[in-house]
Image (cartoon, rainbow, N blue to C red):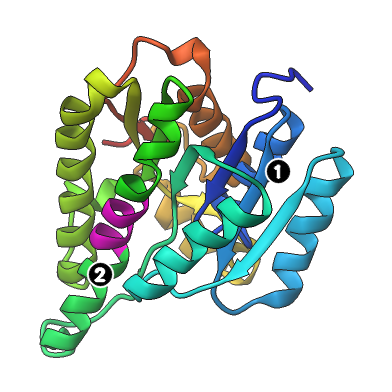
């Protein structure tokens, strides 16, 4: 435990499992009190709370849909009320469904944009006052390699993640004078519990195009996020960093 974030409050959207949970736990390990949103899996959220508290930090799990602007703002308000001002933000929650062009209805496209672009904007702008009052803060947006390497089943997802990349870069420039750093990480293939159900031959096909010949772990992405939030990255803002085993 480094104590890097001692006395600070972090908010991680989509923190109940996967990359979000690994990030929330790593932030607690390094001294932060951590709030996180989750949408459905209460058992996974409870496990994340327990892991945060095991590091002696306060934890707050907030059930919220990041595709609903009112719930996004409610999450911010609840975090401030129960933990305090937010100076570390990770916009990780995402709408990720694969669908054909015929399945991509206007309502579904709006859902991609609301969750993957609008929610990060709302959360970032909502914590600006907290960060300015503290003399600065840091934001990391979790994008995807699919933002720049889409496939036919990912029109909505890739478009929204490309928008998130642009938002991160533009916002970093706009808020630099306020002492707010904003960076973006783009994970590649990251292993989850679902990976255990994938046929080994299919997994071999998935990883054959990765120079490191394997999928990544959620904790490997989390460590990059924590680094970008830390003072070790004090001169890094507006960056897009792939965590993808050599893929681009």
Residue 41 higher or lower than 184, as above or below: below
- In the figure, is residue 145 to the left or right of 133? left
Residue at 33% from the left image edge and 71% from the top image edge:
69
| Span colored in magenta | 116-123
Image position of 79 with respect to 131: above or below:
below
Mark 2, residue position: 114
Q: Position of residue 227 (x, y in %)?
A: 52, 23
Q: Magenta span has 119? A: yes
Indicate the position of residue 64 as horizontal and vertical percent values: 51, 73
Looking at the rendered structure, the number of numbered marks drawn on it comes to 2
Q: Which image quadrant is residue 181 in? A: top left
Would residue 26 be found to the left or right of residue 140 on screen?
A: right
The vertical placement of 231 against 90, above or below, is above
Determine whether the residue tagged by mark 1 lies in a helix, strand or loop: helix
- Which of marks 2 and 1 precedes in the sequence? 1
Q: Residue 56 versus residue 224: which sits nearer the camera?
A: 56
The stretch drawn in magenta includes residue 77: no
What residue sits right under mark 1 in the picture?
25
């Amino acid at each position: 435990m480094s104590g890097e974030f001692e006395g600070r409050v972090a908010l991680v959207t989509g923190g109940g499992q996967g990359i979000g949970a690994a990030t929330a736990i790593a932030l607690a390990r390094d001294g932060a009190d951590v709030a996180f949103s989750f949408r459905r899996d209460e058992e996974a959220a409870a496990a994340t709370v327990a892991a945060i508290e095991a590091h002696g930090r306060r934890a707050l799990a907030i059930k919220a849909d990041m595709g609903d602007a009112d719930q996004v703002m409610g999450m911010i308000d609840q975090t401030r009320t129960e933990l305090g001002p937010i100076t570390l933000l990770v916009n990780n929650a995402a709408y990720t469904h694969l669908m054909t062009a015929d399945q991509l209805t206007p309502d579904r496209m709006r859902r991609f944009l609301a969750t993957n672009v609008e929610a990060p904007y709302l959360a970032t702008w909502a914590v600006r006052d907290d960060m300015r009052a503290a003399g600065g803060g840091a934001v990391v947006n979790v994008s995807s390699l699919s933002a720049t390497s889409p496939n036919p089943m990912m029109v909505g997802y890739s478009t929204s993640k490309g928008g998130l990349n642009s938002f991160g870069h533009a916002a970093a420039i706009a808020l630099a004078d306020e002492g707010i750093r904003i960076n973006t990480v783009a994970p590649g293939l990251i292993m989850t519990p679902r990976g255990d159900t994938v046929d080994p031959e299919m997994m071999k096909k998935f990883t054959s195009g990765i120079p490191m010949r394997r999928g990544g772990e959620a904790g490997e992405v989390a460590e990059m996020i924590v680094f970008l939030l830390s003072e070790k990255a004090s001169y890094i803002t507006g960056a897009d960093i792939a965590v993808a085993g050599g893929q681009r």
